[in-house]
Structure formats: structure tokens, C-alpha cells
Image: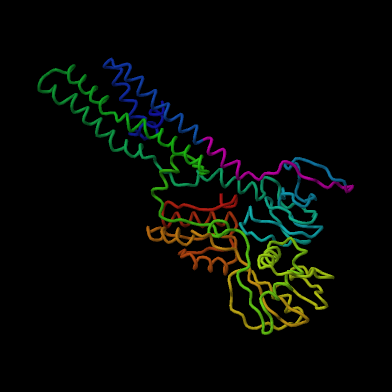
Amino acid sequence: WAAVKNGMKGKFFDENFLMSIATIGALIIGEYAEAVGVMLFFQVGIYFEERATERSRNAVMDAVDLRPEEVRLIACDGSVQVVNPEDVQVGSHIEIRPGDRIPLDGRVVEGTTRIDTAAVTGEPVPVSATVGTEVMSGCINVDGRIVLEVTHELKDSMVMRILDAVENAAASKPKIDRFITRFSRVYTPIVVALAIIVAIVPPLFTGEWQYWIYTALTFLVVSCPCALVLSVPLAFFSGIGAGSRQGILFKGGKAIEAMSRVKAIAFDKTGTITTGTFNVQTVEVASGYTENEVLQYAAALEAVSTHPIAMSIVEEVQRRGVEFNAAKDVKEISGHGMVGTVEGHTVLVGNGRLLAKENIATPLIDYVYGSEVFVAVDGQYVGRIIIADSLKADSKEAIRRMNGKGYQTVMLTGDVAASAKYIAQQVGIQGVRAELLPQDKLEVVQSLRNDHGSVMFVGDGINDA
């Protein structure tokens, strides 16, 4: 039946047509066991491949499904009701507690917090959110309770756009024929043509039509590459299963075949090329201070914070075995840093804007990859701490080997451009596209496909999927 349907679409010479004529030929010459065996094993092979593909595809969809199960809707009287996300309208107010995943796109109308956007943008550092900040569904509320005004219904939210992108990825991919289909397009016409010649040409001279037609049908049956046709689906079944046991999910046999034709490889940055964890890289000090002293002052204030950058400073101090006294009267200056008192000294720890706001002069400093934490004591700059995501141990070697094999390597990341370019230079990646959302990455991948053909994307998170 598949051969008939494909024939109606003008696709005559595929593996279904090849198996069909072999089966019909076997039935005509009385080789019933051969006819049944060919079709049975062919269908069994396809069945196993489809089962493995379906399990793998379901696992992929489960991994990227960030759809909320419930929403805490704030009613007109101020009470909180737990409702289905489909029932929430644009303009409604919803409550997001610390640790909750944000269910719908919205705007903060009450509260202050930090938002972990790693699942959507890949950026590992939580971002501050205050009244007026736009936040995307799928992200996680880290610290405080906030109230959002919903700006998009569930069907138009970021979590649904990510899910739709994964579900519809196959529709936008170039049509990739299986090897057996490409083989059949060449092999089948040749076999059929030779069978017709055997059935017609010799009888024109001998007159033995029945004998030569029987011979031609026998030739069709013998020429059926059963071992090849039957082994391909089973090989895919085995490959998909072996990949699953190693934590690799293939969305089907075509994905495995497509890897052999890849010309360009696009990489995510955070968690893929880098470790995704923050560590102190360098400590620069002003005259009269040591690295440990600068770290002591910084840790005294950062010890009260749960921000990843603050925690990395405290961890570095502990690693060095340096003791520090807790700061007093610590205050957070939103978007800038912290101020407090350490052993009678006023200490500021934060970004460059904090020192500029307090009119504290800083020396001319070259750009260094990572996040800068400036430290000032009693109105004087005493140093800065560079904190960054570290490269994975094998990233540089892996990229070098891929470049050596002629692949076009490109990094696509939601991180800022300066950080992305620095990492690309360190590992040898040829191209960089930074500050991208998931839909932006999809557009870039489609552009790469137009330029290079098959493209592989390597990432570690849901946003990459």
C-alpha cells in the first residue's frame, strides 16, 4: 500500500516498490515462503525502528516541556486562587513565590527578586527584577515574592514557543532521504529494466515466452537486496537504543544519517563550552593591599548574599584558608552592589557604576573576560575581583579537531558579546553570535543551513533544544 501511495505521488522507485515487486514475483512463481518472509521481516524491522524513534522523541519532548500545571491567580478581593494556566487572561495578576517557575509571560507590578533565566536564555547569572521588569515564562523566581501582570496568554507565552519550536522542527528541516531510499532510486530501475529485457528479448528469438517470463520473475526475486533492506531499520533500532543507554536521544533514523552530511556545527556557550559554574579568576589590587585583604573585605559583605558571584568570592576565601569578620550594617544598592562596615571601615563592593556613583576614582583597566567586582575602602579603590565561567577541560581540543576536519564552527549564546568573543578566541571557534533568545538562535541556524547545508547544534539546556 505504501508503494501505491508513493507511486501516486510520482515516487515509484523507493524501497517499498522494490520489496513489493519482489514479493509479487515470488507469489507468481510459487515461492510463497519467500514472499511472506520478505514482507514480514521488512515490516518487523520498520516496526522496531519506529518504536525506538517514538520513545526517543517522547523523551525529548518531556525534557523541554516547561508548561505550568497551575497558576496562583490573585482575585479582585486580594485572595489567591489556584487555577489552570489556560484560564488566565492578559491583564490578570498572578503570584510567584520564591522557587516557583514563572508560568506565564508578564510584567512585575509588585516586589523585587532575582530571576534565573538559564532555562530560556542560557545565561547562568540570575538577573534582578523590580517593578516594571518584563519576565519570561519558564524562568525561575530565585528570592522574593513578586506579583506579575500577565502580558501573554499561555498559547503565546515563551514556554509554548519553545515547545512549538521543538515539535515543528521536523517541518522546517530539509527533506533528508534515507540511504535505502536513495539506493532504491538507482538500483530498482536497473533491476526492473533488466527483468523486462530478460522477459522480452530472448523470446523474440526462441519463442519460449513462458520460460523467459518465469526466469525474469525469478531474477526479480533473487535481485531483491533483502539483507540490506532488512538490516537498515534494525541497525537504526540498535543505534537509537545504544544512544539512549548513553544518554543520547535520536529523534529517528534520519537524524543519524544526517550527521554524516553535517558541514557546520553551532555551539551554545554556557554549560557546553564552559562549565557553567563561577570561580574567581584573578584578583587585582591597588598599591598597599594584598589579594587576601581585598578578598577579605569583599567576603565580609558578600557572605550575606546568595548570588552566585557572591558565593564564588566566599568560596575562594575559604579555599585560601583566609578568615574574615562579618560586616555590619550591610545594605544592598539595587543594580550596583553592597555597602557595609568592616572593622570600622566603610566598604563598598559592587560594579563600576557603584564606585562612579560614590565618586571613587578607578585606574584605567583593560577589559577582562568575566564579571568585575570592585572593592573600595573608606572612599578609596583597593582592587577588583574577576569572576568568570571556566572553560571545560576538553573544549579547546574538541573545537580544534572539528576545525581540522573542515567543519564551520559557530557559537550562539544569550551571553553578552564581549564575553562570547573572548571565549570563542580562547577555544578557536570561527564565528560568534551573542545576546540571542531561543527564537533568535533558530533563525541563525536556519541561515547557517542555507549557507552550509546540514547543521548540527550542540547545547546543554532546554533553551538549546
Q: Is residue 129 left or right of residue 121?
A: right
The quadrant holding residue 299 is: bottom right
Q: Which residue ends up furthest to the left in the rendered image?
A: 205
| Residue that extends furthest to the front in the rendered view of this protein | 321
Q: Based on the picture, tell me whether residue 65 belongs to the magenta stretch.
A: yes
Span colored in magenta: 54-78
Residue 297, quarter of picture: bottom right
Question: In screen coordinates, is 252 left or right of 112?
Answer: left
Residue 398 placement (x, y as % from top left): 45, 58
Q: Tell me, what colour scheme is on the image?
A: rainbow
The image quarter containing residue 438 is: bottom right
Q: Residue furthest right?
A: 77
Compared across the picture, whether 240 is left or right of 156 comes to: left
Q: Nearer the viewer, residue 187 or 243?
A: 243
Residue 101 among magenta residues: no
Q: Residue at x 79, y 45 (%)?
A: 72
